[in-house]
Amino acid sequence: MCMGQLGSLLPHVVVPSILAAFLIPEWQLSGAQAGLLAGSGAAGYMLTVPVLATLTDRIDARKILIVGSAVSALGTLLFGLLATGLWSGALFNAIAGAGFAGAYMPGLKALTDRLAPGDSSRAITLYTSSFSVGVGVSFLVSQLVAEAWGWRNAFFVTAVGPLVMLTVCVLLRPAEPKPATRRLLDFTPVFQNRKAMGFILGYGAHCFEIYAIRTWIVAFWTFVAARNPVSSILTPIVVSVVFSVLAMPASILGNEFALRFGRHRAISAVMFASAVVALLIGVFADKSPWLLLPLVFVYAITVPADSGALTSGMSMAAEPDYRGATMAMHTTVGFSMSAVGAWALGIALDAAGGPQNSTAWTAAFLVLAAGILLGPLALYWSRRETP
């Protein structure tokens, strides 16, 4: 399943990867428009995942995986073939995002349906942390192909990735869930599960931060490199790939930290640390890249370190008969905030002078810090006694 997910993720950040160098100048996009374009994939995901993830409580999740992977490949291919501006690009990116909604959480459900309960926490963390490796590969392949053969070919090449998940689905043994008797989109039991909702809302804050920085990391390091000559090794491609790949060990270690010291305490500590690092990057946005680079790589660790702990916490807090619905709510909230995060940073950049201005990047990282600090508040709320 982790290998299949790497294939599903190959097209995942192709739009953010090529925004700064290709789409913004060619389509004359503002920061807000660029954020809207990048966030459209998360919006398409958000609109379809409640139904698709909840269906996994009724039918074998691998059936949804097959359809979702095919749609993801189709949307990516259509972007490369037909996108000519903001709205056509947003439409095709949303289609690809809707397809990914049939791959990520249904993939997690397909995995947990085939595991013994005692194997869940670390297996879920491995699955969620492999997301970061897939994003790193997506950054690398997208930028290399776009620079060598043009940005449209980056979509053609990455559209092949979701077919890997189709192959994995063929190898999975069947695992039909118990017959469901409730309504399909009945989320009432999920909302009533305060413990699970704390992790879900915390995941929303996490997704706001992580998708926003993934959308804009290439543009930010392009700004840094343009102001201060750096080693030819430290290109936006290298920085964005390393930033993404560091997330896998960070997420695994974050979950181990949560198992040892308590999930709520560990997640809150990571979120506070992430806010501090974001503030430091914002304050020093116009300084030497040799000062910024260590901060960026520390941020690459703090941003994803809460991911596995949040998702495994949600899964373990879910009522067994409503696990699919709980996962649906988890990922709906998460990707809704992903779309908001990418757009919010674009708005902040525009409001403070544009991505060529250091003040704008200070404002952007202030927004990131404010977003992640909502996470500890959600966890604190979930632990309070119900009146």
Image (cartoon, helix red, strand yellow):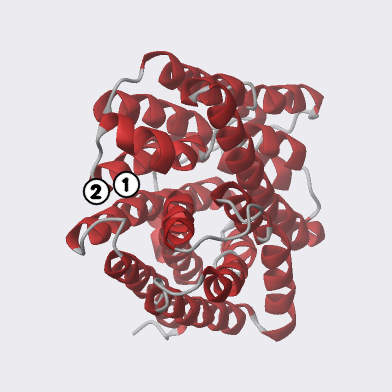
Identify the residue under disc 1.
35
Q: Which mark is residue 32?
A: 2
Residue at the image point whose x is 36% and y is 33% from the top:
23
Q: Quadrant of the C terminus?
A: bottom left
- Badge 2 crowding class, 10 Å Cα cut-off, few under 14, some 14 to 19, many 20 or more, is many
Residue positioned most to the left? 351
Quarter in which the N terminus is drawn: top right
Give the image location of residue 234, x and y in percent: 62, 56
User: Is 349 situated left or right of 139 in this image?
Assistant: left
User: What residue is shown at x 40% (from left), y 71% (from top)?
Assistant: 285
**Amino acid at circle 2:** Ala
The answer to whether residue 337 is above or below residue 54 is below
Q: Against 190, is 166 above or below?
A: above
Secondary structure, mark 2, is: helix
Q: Are marks 1 and 2 in contact (CB under 8 Å)?
A: yes
The three-letter amino acid code for the residue at tag 1 is Gly
In this rendering, the answer to whether 282 lies above or below 4 is below
Say what secondary structure mark 1 lies in.
Answer: helix
- Residue ID at (57%, 58%): 319
Q: Left of 275 or right of it: where is 137?
A: right
